[in-house]
Image (cartoon, rainbow, N blue to C red):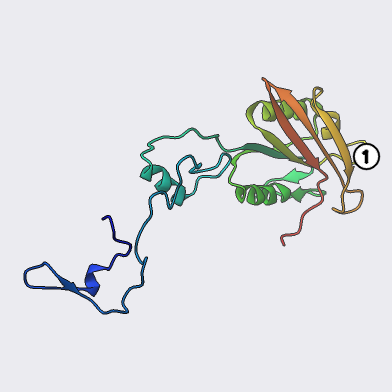
Amino acid sequence: PDGCDTVVPQEYVEASADGNRIRFAADIVRAGDNRRLRGEDLARGQAALPAGRIIQPADLGVLASLGFAEVRVRRRLRVAFFSTGDELRSIGEPLDAGCVYDSNRYTLHGMLRRLNVDLIDMGVVRDDPAALEAAFRTACETADAVITSGGVSVGEATTPSRSWPASATSRSGRSPCGPAGRWRSGASPRAGATRCCSACRATRWPSW
């Protein structure tokens, strides 16, 4: 009400028999306690939620308090990933001589889950140029970003590097990820959008 600047919680007061007066301890509140000023939480013209923010539970409450049943959002990033190599075996398959279990793909899965993205696990792609090119094409057409493990070194069997999308612009370099560690990244245009691709040498990553 006009002329008032402080609110006393009801549990701190005693009302008179006729209800016209109340009593409370002098030190129970200070001037300005328990009041809410107009525009205190959100000023007129101020953005309630900035663009690019990941919606959290508290944000849903803010939107509801403003009367919004729906808001326009961007979908989550979609990431496709796969491992490459004839020597790779999935967990549960017999481990033939000269073969290793595909561990990098599980590491990538766990790392990507932390980023709250939609995952497309494309499994293991063999060292066949046609299969690899098809995998890259499918990944670029269905995902916003593509991550692969294997085949970006300098040997004759680096098939993934040779199967890189022809329309992609790329760059490569060395990494401290084991001997002859290399990486390659680039971008490939697809249907009016750009898909990012990244590949790394298939050194087995420790589980730190």
Tell me the quarter of the picture where residue 152 sits. top right
Pick the front one: 106 or 45: 45
Placement of 198 over or under 141, stated as above or below: below
Q: Is 116 situated left or right of 181 in this image?
A: left
| Percent of width and height locating residue 111 | 66, 51
Placement of 29 over or under 75, stated as above or below: below
Pick the front one: 174 or 159: 174
Q: Is 1 situated left or right of 22 in this image?
A: right
Give me the residue at 80% from left, 33% from top. Answer: 186
Give me the residue at 6% from left, 69% from top. Answer: 18
Pick the front one: 167 or 153: 167
- Disc 1 element: loop
| Percent of width and height locating residue 21 | 14, 70
Residue type beneath disc 1: Val
| Percent of width and height locating residue 203 | 82, 51
Q: Is 98 situated left or right of 39 in this image?
A: right
Extreme front residue here?
3
Extreme top residue here?
191
Visible in this render: residue 193?
Answer: yes
Tell me the quarter of the picture where residue 151 sits. top right
Visible in this render: residue 85?
Answer: no
| Percent of width and height locating residue 20 | 11, 67
Quick one: label 1, few (<14), some, or many (20+) residues within 10 Å?
A: few
Pick the front one: 170 or 73: 73
Quarter of the image containing the N terminus? Answer: bottom left
Quarter of the image containing the C terminus? Answer: bottom right
Give me the residue at 38% from left, 42% from top. Answer: 66
Give me the residue at 70% from left, 39% from top. Answer: 82
Placement of 114 over or under 12, stated as above or below: above
Q: Which residue is mark 1?
A: 154
Extreme left residue here?
18
